[in-house]
Amino acid sequence: MSTSSGASSVKRRENIESPPQEQSRPSLSKNKLKKLRRDQAWEEGREKRKELRKLRNKERKERKRATAADENSDNVQPDSAVAKRKASDTTDLRENKKPKQVKAIQLPVSFVIDCGFDDLMLDGERKSLASQITRSYSDNHRVPFRSHLFISTFEGHLRERFDTVLNGHHHNWKGVRFVEGDFEEAAKLAHELMIGAQGGSHAGAFADNKAFTRATEPSGQEVVYLTSDSPDILTELKPYTTYVIGGLVDKNRHKGICYKRAMDHGVKTARLPIGDYMKMASRFVLATNHVVEIMLRWLELGDWGKAFLEVMPKRKGGVLKDGIVVLDGAPTTAGDDRATDDGSKEMLRKEEQISNDSMDEPHKG
């Protein structure tokens, strides 16, 4: 009896220590079994699918070759005809993409950007000035009536930036001259150029204005330094005259420096007639490229009011003064029988927004 009871106790311990086989292998659900069978079937058919893809690709290529052969047999053209058709298609695309550009007319007037303030500017300010010079060149290059453009005192850090960071692209610019000397040296070169054979013609605002209809010989070199500190107002641009714009970006640190520079050289000064035409929400100081663009617009329109409205940055909040309507290049009052309220509203609608990234730096005069 003791032997049998001992054996039964051993069996019970073995049953306790060794769990049933079913517990070590948990059964799979029906969904998992179905997925497992699908995966196995997909793997087994991999090679068969590969062969089918090769066969379909081969058939598709053969159909393309047959179609191309049929088209070539139906549309046989001499090589010259094909070449002419391709050239015609290329020409049509170019004409559709690029509108015809009217050739600019050179006028006998010069703009000089005086860059003699290199040591007064920070690196970021020189960067802004380089952008303004680039923008001025671009504007002068694409207007219908262009000026002779000079960049004076082109040296130091500014020139280094043009030669290195800007990869010397200014060497390919047309219609602009870079001068190492100061603005007076540039003005002498401009005077010689204007009275020469390539000086330009009396067109644009010069032709429309009665004061300039007679092509008179210049009586001498005429230089005007534009600065907002000048007591004199620039009423019109004149042929055979050089207008100097201070190339300075200084956040208004050096007040009156351009005016002092002109006085030291005994040069006339003037300021744009912004206050005669416009009401501004901020100071009348503009970026160098905006001054150039305003004068270029005047050369085309002969109208300061229109030029200001089209060029003045929107952030300046400039609008025509109350009771003033721009007509035929002169400000008139609302009581003039030529002026109408509709005309004034039309002018206000023409105000355009100018991009103000690096060009926003002020031109200090």
Image: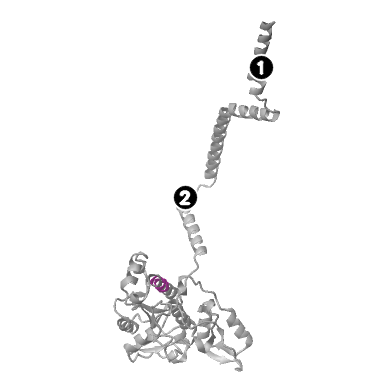
Q: Residue furthest front?
A: 2
Q: Quadrant of residue 148?
A: bottom left
Where does residue 311 sit, x and y in percent of width and height?
A: 50, 78
State the colouring used for the structure image: one colour
Going 53% across and 39% down the picture, which residue do you hit?
Answer: 65
| Amino acid at dot 2 | Pro
Observer-nearest of 80 and 175:
175
Residue range in magenta is 126-134
Which of the two discs, 2 and 1, labels the residue nearer the N terminus? Answer: 1
281 is within the stretch colored magenta: no
Nearer to us in this view, 57 or 152: 152
Residue 335: mark in rendering: none
* Vertical order, 235 against 149 (above or below): below
The crowd level at tag 1 (other Cα within 10 Å; few <14, some 14-19, many 20+) is: few
Q: How many marks?
A: 2
Circle 2 sits on which residue?
78
Work out whether residue 196 or residue 64 is closer to the camera in this orientation and state it: 196
- Labels 2 and 1 touching (C-beta < 8 A): no
Residue placed under numbered mark 1 in the picture: 15
Using a 10 Å C-alpha cutoff, classify the residue at mark 2 as few (fewer than 14 neighbours), some (14 to 19) or many (20 or more): few
Label 1 SS:
helix
Q: Is residue 45 above or below residue 341?
A: above
Please provide percent x and percent y for residue 9.
67, 13
